[in-house]
Amino acid sequence: MEYREEHRREALIGTVVLHAALAALFIFTVFKGPDPPLEALGGDGVELNYGVDEVGSGDIQSQAPANESQNREDSRPPAAQPDPTPPQPTAQPDPTPPSEARVVTSEAEESPVTAPPVEKPAPPREEVKPEPPRPKVDQRAVFTPRANRAEGGGNGVNGTSNAPTGNNNGDNPGTLGDKGDPRGTYGGTAYSGEPGSGGRGTSPGSGGLEMAGWAIVSKPSVAALDNNSGSVRFKIKINADGEVESVTKVSGTVSAAQERACRDELLKLEFRRTSSAEGGATGFYTFRFTVR
């Protein structure tokens, strides 16, 4: 009995100590959520930088083909190059029909006399040479910083200058290219990964601005109004002071209410210059909503 009583006392003391330690652990352990909270981050994810190359360096981002120019000003669009006129096919001469033999008859002779046929030489036949294949033109190499002619165009979108707009961005020093992902946006900062997505939050729309020479003072925040995923793209026109003049829908798959919410938010935007270009500009902004 004494042996059992001794071990019973040790077991009781161990149980009390264990429960006291667990109680202290629960009291002093506090779960802290992320700052800012997840609700404010819902849907933003990773914003990919738009690009078509695997390498690039620098921070000059534009819609022009990749080149080494340091000019950040948007230039005029490229001059239209008419397609070369295809050569006209040479008409084939009609083959000369064979001459018919003439039959000569005479009253003095009973049997007809056949005159030998006269062969006319056929004109030489001209060979039609097959049209040589048209060489493929690399549109990315058509306009370079050296192609600055008064009668030609630039390589931009909405500018007025003939000076070529630069485009070289990425995190690979010493390389030339427009690094990024075709699914990204011109305002994105990540060069790899998956486009941003998420659930319902204060700003579930993930998109970006596409406007050379300008940046948004404060990024628009539009909440998802329904449980449908989709995107909507707007064309924005601003004046020289960075004020929005018009917002026009280009394409989209969201509801009418969601579209109005995005449009109203864009009308409130203010823009600031990032280059020395004069005048206003025209660009695009895309909202993306992904609800899981």
Image (tube, rainbow, N blue to C red):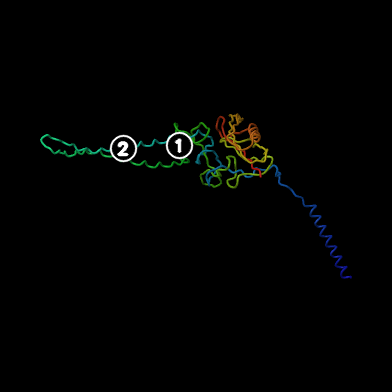
What kind of element bears circle 2? loop
Front one among 118 and 115: 115
Going from N to C along the chain, the mark reached first, 2 or 1, is 2
Front one among 259 and 223: 259
| Res 102 quadrant in image | top left
Q: Amino acid at mark 2?
A: Gln
In percent of width and height, residue 291 lies at 66, 43
In percent of width and height, residue 111 lies at 13, 39
Q: Indicate left or right for 292 with 213 as reference.
A: right
Residue 54 badge: none
Check the image and report above or below for 16 versus 177: below
Check the image and report above or below for 174 versus 90: below
Q: Which residue is mark 2?
A: 92
Number of marks present in the image shown: 2
Q: Amino acid at mark 1?
A: Ala
Q: Which residue is mark 1?
A: 147
Q: Indicate left or right for 230 with 94 as reference.
A: right
